[in-house]
Image (tube, rainbow, N blue to C red):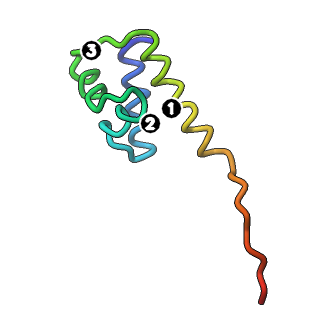
Amino acid sequence: MTQSELLDQIERFLLRHQMAPTAFGLYVVNDPNIVRDLRSGDRSPSLKTVQRLVDFMEGYESDRDTPKNVKQEPNNE
């Protein structure tokens, strides 16, 4: 995956989930500036960082697609 492809994937993720780039950076790598730095070309992430970014996005997607077991109260009408 090229840096451009990674950034495209991150941008689509942020739009789809209406997540701020700073929040994304904090959640994934504890760095609120990573998206800004990637956008400006000031940073070339390590393979480990790229994997963390991709894993987070994929895990977030699958967590949202999986129904949660919610205990529902009985309807006493």
**How busy is the neighbourhood of tag 2: few (under 14 within 10 Å), some, or many (20 plus)?**
some
- Inspect the image, locate mark 1, and give the three-letter code of the amino acid beneath it: Met
Task: Choose the circle earlier in sequence order: 2 or 3.
Answer: 2
Q: Who's the residue at 69% across and 51% down the image?
A: 67
In this picture, residue 5 sits left or right of residue 31: right
State the separation of the CA atoms marked 1 and 3.
19 Å
Q: Which mark is residue 43?
A: 3
View extreme (front): residue:
30
- Rendering coords of residue 34 (x, y %): 30, 25
- Give yes or no for contact between labels 2 and 1 (Cβ–Cβ under 8 Å): yes
| SS at mark 3 in the image | loop
Identify the residue at the far bottom of this view. Answer: 77
When asked about the image quadrant of residue 11, the answer is top left
User: Residue under circle 1?
Assistant: 57
In the figure, 24 relative to 74: above or below? above
Q: Amino acid at mark 2?
A: Phe
Q: Which residue is mark 2?
A: 13
Of the numbered discs 2 and 1, the one sitting upstream in the chain is: 2
Q: CA distance from mark 2 to mark 3?
A: 19 Å
